[in-house]
Image (cartoon, rainbow, N blue to C red):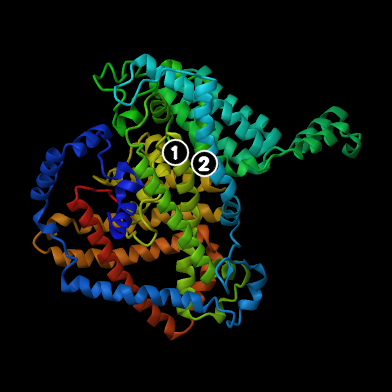
Amino acid sequence: MGAFSFLRNVYDLDTLDTRFIVSSTTPYQTVIEARNDTAAASKERATKWKSRPSSSESKWNTPEFYLYLIVIGLAIPYMFWIAYGASKPSHPNYKNYERYLSPGWIPGRKIDATDTQYRTFRGNIPFLAALLILHPLLRRLYNVLVYRANTGNQASRPTLEEADQRLNQRASFDFGFAIIYLVALHGVSILKILGILYLNYQVATTLPRKSVPVATWIFNIGILFANELCKGYKFKDIASVLWAFLSGGLIDESNSSLVNWGRWLDSYGGLMGRWEILFNITVLRLISFNLDYYWSLDRRSASPVEKQLDPSSLSERDRVSIPAQAKDFSFRNYVAYTIYAPLYLTGPIITFNDYISQLRYKPATLEISRTIRYGLRFALALLAMEVILHYDYVQAIAKFSPRWAEYTAAQLCLLSYFNLHLIWLKLLLPWRFFRLWSLVDGVDPPENMIRCVSDNWSTLAFWRSWHRSFYRWSLRYIYVPLGGSSFANAWDAARSILTYVLVFTFVALWHDIQLRLLIWGWLIVFFMLPEMAAGSLFPKRKWEGRPTAYRMLCCVGAVGNVLMMITANLVGFAFGVEGLRAILAGIFEHFSGYVFLAAACTVLFVGVQVMFEIRESEIRRGINLKC
């Protein structure tokens, strides 16, 4: 295999996540068997080729797309050059943020490590790499020395008893390691975390069945607010309240041994004393456990065996929807799931049913060659982030040099654009790393990022590809229970819009309890409406005889969509409302700003055409990601 062919495999959808190339109703084991059967695989490819739509012929080798590729080939270097020009030491604003830059590893360049999230991740990469290696090795050592179990062999399907032994073996290790992991990360705050977990478990298992969903949502949304308002429940603050109650407020707390003891406990907060910051991701798992348990009470008979399915080769949909056995909803398994080390800090999110299924039977999707390619893809993304931060000081400029009037319209636009890309990368890298750790350990969670942030033209589709595991979680636990969406009549349309508002209100509050994120969530819903309206006013079926005209019409609308998505995300995750207003004022202050915006829209039009064809290419391969 040549270097170019290997690189294509690294960036293939199959490397990213097998869920993208296989239907959610198809067990991956059947794909492996078909792949090993050369004749069957060739026949399947021929069938797909013959059944492809006649209108989906490739456009890559047409004069139109040659022109598009030339435009993109010129535009991308120019975009980097403009952002680089704004980051040069010769720029008047450079001196305002130079002291915030750090020494870089590229000769002659400093690095913009001003973003706290990425700086923390970057500084801990050696320790995280050690965990990625040591954690799976410790599991193997545990399996050999502490909990030996007959889990079957790779050549034959495990029996039900062997599957149960594998589940208990893995869950017991995950539980023990979770306790050690929490102590190392959060010190004595483990008591607070385990207290919250215990209360949530009681909500699911002791309340009357019909009260569980409402109580679960009230409890967990309450925890989100309480964690924020009480700043992690410092032991000193708890002791102060107790002391004021016990002393009647008559004795100064500075003389209280109880308050001093609370302060002393707070000093043992572990490596991450502010545990509440990343606890939001755990809240999603708490809700998943409770609702999976609640739904399992109605479907005790829906076991794989009774549905005449092979429990060792379930499709992804079956792993998620078929409830775990009653005995699986134990407190040990619950803690092992909610604090599963590789996914504890950032996800991706996996449902309780899926987690238990993968503990009982090793997923067929776990293949060493694919995991290696996935690891290489993560390394290349990390390299891209590092190179950009060495040459484009976008984040430092945004944080410490907000004199937007001193930048040209082109610089303002591209600094904002690259800021979004760096936000995308700083989220992608932890998600990819922790998913890689999970894959090495034997659990296959969903991939969070499908598309590059620049490869999105639809507001609706964007949320299927950005933080995809959260999107799927929201579908299962919020969107579908609220009735989904339908625009068959005015009443259904109003109900559907309300559903979207509720979903994105929760998404915004889950990210952080801030007004700008609420505005972001509502803007997303507002910006969805034109796309929905356009889909109703210009249905594809009415343009079947004019596919090119329809493609051009869709592309014009898509450019508007892209501009609205950029606006919403700049408000939510970059500059806020006031910052965006200042940037827009700087862009449109001079006539050159309007000229640059027109040029930018032209380039976006070309880019969207390429996005359309990328998706058509996937459909020709039998892949439809719907995003």
Q: Is residue 392 visible?
A: no
Mark 2 or mark 1: name the one nearer the start of the chain.
2
- Measure the C-alpha gap from mark 2 to mark 1: 8 Å
Inspect the image, locate mark 2, and give the three-letter code of the amino acid beneath it. Leu
Neighbours of disc 1 within 10 Å: few (<14), some (14-19), many (20+):
many
> Mark 1 is on which residue type?
Val
Rendering quarter of residue 41: top left
Checking the image for residue 440, the label placed there is: 1
Could you tell me if the residues under marks 2 and 1 are in contact, i.e. CB atoms within 8 Å? yes
Give the structural element (helix, strand or loop) at label 1: helix
Q: Residue at x 60, y 40 (%)?
A: 225
Q: Residue 179 in the image: state x and y as whole percent.
A: 61, 29
The residue wearing badge 2 is 132
Residue neighbourhood size for the residue with mark 2, other residues' Cα within 10 Å, grouped as few (<14), some (14–19), many (≥20): many
Q: Is residue 342 left or right of residue 547?
A: right
Q: Is 31 drawn above or below residue 385 in the view shown?
A: above
Secondary structure state at the residue bearing disc 2? helix
Q: Is residue 54 above or below residue 239?
A: below
Residue 504 visible in this rendered orientation of the protein:
yes
Residue 280 point in image, percent of width and height: 55, 41
Q: Residue furthest bottom?
A: 591
In the image: residue 576, left or right of residue 500: right
- In the image, what residue occupies the spot 58% across and 82% down? 91
